[in-house]
Image (cartoon, rainbow, N blue to C red):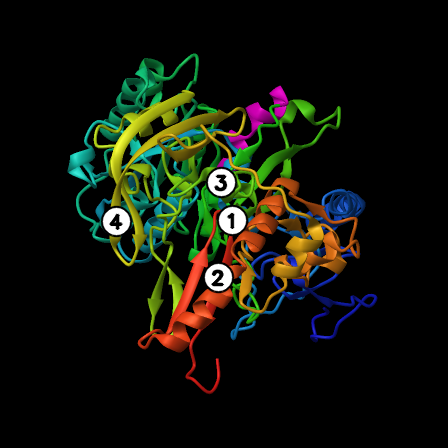
Amino acid sequence: MDEEGNFIGGEFPLEENEHFNKLSVNTLMSDIQVPTNVYNKDPNILNGVYMSEALNDVFISNFQKDPTLTWQYFGSSAGFFRLYPGIKWTPDSNGVVSFDCRNRNWYIQAATSPKDIVILVDVSGSMKGLKMTIAKHTINTILDTLGENDFVNVIAYTDYVRYVEPCFKGTLVQADLDNREHFKLLVEELHVKGEAKVKKAMKESFRILADVTNGQGSLCNQAIMLITDGAMEDFQSVFEEFNWPDKKVRVFTYLIGRDMTFSENIKWIACNNKGYYTHISTLADVQENVMEYLHVLSRPMVINHDHDIIWTEAYMDSTFRYLASHSLLLMTSVAMPVFSKKKETISHGILLGVVGTDVPLLEVMKLAPRYKLGAHGYAFLITNNGYILAHPDLRPLYIDGKKLKPKPNYNSVDLSEAEWEDTEDSLRTAMVKGETGTLTLDGRAAVDKGVSVFASAIFCVKNIKLLCIFFGMVLTRGHGQYMFFGNVSVEEGLHDLQQPDLTIADEWTYCETDIDPHHRKLTQLQAVVRYLTGKEPDLECDEILLQQVLFDAVVTAPLEAYWTALMLTESGFISAFLGTRSGLMRVIRYAGSEKR
């Protein structure tokens, strides 16, 4: 689109696609989105877009090989976002497209390793007014770049050192959502007064980072973020005592305000401690300048060629939330960094961006079919920090009027909050440590509307190597010792399977309908029937589950006549129903003597 709002370039046809939540997409091409605050004709943007055009063929090839794939994308360190399949990006009511891929968790986690961060903020009298507003926004932006694998603390200083949260004195805390939001509330209450003496605060920061190296922190990158409008003291003795010559702690400096009097001092601090200096004079400068520290922390990964794959915590797919057809869906993202391999720049450690794809957690859980887990059995996934990715008791939405909305902390629910029977946290501890095995616990299993039954369950846990994801299965005691198999003919089973009072669980996968686009509009029952009648022989179906559902259809067929007779002779019946282990459901409703 040009400056006058006219579309330029070739046609970009869009078609509604069932696989992508009925959004209008272009599966033949990816497209580019640039945030409103990034100049779209910057040479770095234009060169990056041209360079990344080769990803079109890669994305298309990936989707052809695996049609269950969803969104594939590349987020550039320059700010542009390449998405496949392409969509139409619609600005908000203010004409702004605020989405910036570099702010997303998948980008931040893939671009850097886990880190310990101490944020030092100057709250002396010279920081009053707009400077303090910018400083607070800078702190909040830094906090937004942290995740559950990082550790953080915030210290305010004048002529003395003050922890914004006294309970966290002398240590670092996990930068999960709750702690980050808590820090943000405390930062808003900061007031300026006194004279700035940063030496004490700097010494305190180095002491904290030295103390957490014994296993309390991330055991990876360490950095101090200094936010101030100037520094007159001589810091050399502090760095000689705590950081030189190894320079294990990076120091990033943010000069706040338009006054450049102390810029050389602030720059010296960063450059002599493997950090980065930035000058922030307005609120609009904050986002771009804060993101620079991520590129610096990524340099060791680039130089060492560490292409670590990361999996994010569960989240609602909100990228396209402004589209009416979009339905909330719990996802995880798989991403990895992309580095420059040019010989002339490889020693500089240049991060080009992050490439990734979204994975619906429902697809992951299909690897543990419900019919194999038995009554009251279920599977679940957690992260390496014990947060739930998928669990039947994870309820991420609440009803607000007529709308479903995500709960504030839906993606930071700990396993201990769902598995109450694990009173000693033995299950959680074993899983987070990466142990594999079984554990037996006694507890209650919910059956319907708050009614529960006592059950003894066996918890089976497995560490999925290289992914930092832990998989668990819960089976009732004795499940799997005996397996029941029935044998009926396909013709006999099909006859009963197509009766009007019968359905099968559409959320179960009897046949994989997502591989071939022509199959995506089929219900599971339609897919089963077409496969068994030979109309769709290419469908991939679960033969064991099909045999079970055919058997259940045959042996439960006499119930229709029995229920009909019962309803005609007895009063008070509204409906009768039966569910079986194979997901088959028979339902008959009584509508009066004249019509059933």
Q: The magenta stretch spans which residues?
A: 293-305
Query: Which picture quadrant has residue 25?
Result: bottom right
**For residue 422: magenta?**
no
Q: Residues within 10 Å of mark 1 (few under 14, many from 20)?
A: many
Structural distance between the alpha carbons of marks 2 and 4: 28 Å
- Numbered circles on residues, count: 4
Query: Which marked residue is nearer to the observer: mark 2 or mark 3?
Result: 2
Structural distance between the alpha carbons of marks 3 and 1: 9 Å
Mark yes or no: residue 304 visible: yes
Structural distance between the alpha carbons of marks 1 and 4: 30 Å
- The relative height of residue 230 versus residue 98 in the rendered view (above or below) is above
- Residue tagged by mark 4? 452
Structural distance between the alpha carbons of marks 3 and 4: 33 Å
- Residue tagged by mark 1? 331
Query: Which picture quadrant has residue 159?
Result: top left
On screen, residue 595 versus residue 325, left or right, reads left
- The amino acid type of the residue labelled 1 equals Met
Query: Which marked residue is nearer to the observer: mark 3 or mark 4?
Result: 4
- The amino acid type of the residue labelled 2 equals Leu
Q: Residue at 31% x, 76% y: name it.
A: 572
- Residue tagged by mark 3? 312
- The relative height of residue 117 versus residue 16 in the rendered view (above or below) is above
Q: Residues within 10 Å of mark 2 (few under 14, many from 20)?
A: some
Q: Residue 461's x, y, as percent?
A: 42, 27
- The amino acid type of the residue labelled 3 equals Thr
> Along the polypeptide, which appears first: circle 3 or circle 1?
3
- Residue tagged by mark 2? 559
